[in-house]
Image: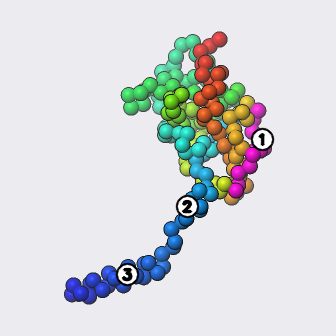
Amino acid sequence: MSSPEAFQALVDIASKTQANALPVPSGSDVSSRQSGIGFSLLGHRFVVPMGQLAEMLDVPESTRLPGVQPWVMGLSNVRGRLLPLFDLAMFFGGTTLAPRRQKRALVIDSDELYCGLVVDQAFGMQHFMKEHYNQNIDGIPEAIAPFVNGGYTDSAGVQWGLFDTNVIARYSRFLNAASA
């Protein structure tokens, strides 16, 4: 194929691609969605908004600390930083039967707090349409309810409570993890 023929073939491909391409989503389409990291805790599903988490990890090995509440799992060295780990199920008065390999640490790294919240299971990125937001979510345990600001119902009808890590970062019982 000669250079002019090859060039014409590329022009034809480009014009066909442009003619058949889907339009780029408008800003209103993108802003009508809420994304977050989904997880389960004590048999319920929750989602944390993306901006509230730094990362999600397999639960790292940790060193127990003396004189702390039983829900404090210990300290872990993650890339040279000491990461306190907290068992959320135990913090909320429950126990989990999830195996360790299934659990995940959701890492908060804000001005107020750097810690790992250990949950029963993580489901990765979840996306919800803003119109599926409900102020009231049924069945949230009373101990967890103050940390949940409504939630979403997915296409399968499953409710996901919107877990607010900013609330736990200011909660005095959580911040005072020393044994009484």
Q: Residue furthest left?
A: 2
* Disc 3 to disc 1, C-alpha distance: 55 Å
Return the x and y of residue 102 as percentages of the image width and height.
Answer: 56, 40
Magenta span: 131-142
Magenta highlight: main SS: loop
Q: What's the amino acid at mark 2?
A: Gly
Whether residue 44 is visible here, answered yes or no, is: no
Q: What's the amino acid at mark 3?
A: Ile
Residue 132 in the magenta stretch? The answer is yes
Q: Name the residue under label 2.
A: 27
Return the x and y of residue 87 as percentages of the image width and height.
Answer: 60, 29
Q: Sequence-wise, which precedes: disc 3 or disc 1? A: 3
- SS for tag 2? helix
Q: Name the residue under label 3.
A: 13
- SS for tag 1? loop
- SS for tag 3? helix
Viewport quadrant of the C terminus: top right
Q: Mark 1 points at which residue?
A: 139
Quarter of the image holding residue 172?
A: top right
Number of labels in the image equals 3
* Disc 2 to disc 3, C-alpha distance: 29 Å
Do the CB atoms of the residues marked 3 and 1 lie less than 8 Å apart? Answer: no
Q: In this rendering, which labeled residue sits more in front, label 3 or label 1? A: 3
Return the x and y of residue 159 as percentages of the image width and height.
Answer: 71, 49
* Disc 2 to disc 1, C-alpha distance: 35 Å
Q: Which residue is drawn at 68% across and 34% down?
A: 147
Q: Sequence-wise, which precedes: disc 2 or disc 1? A: 2
Q: What's the amino acid at mark 1?
A: Gly
Q: Sequence-wise, which precedes: disc 2 or disc 3? A: 3
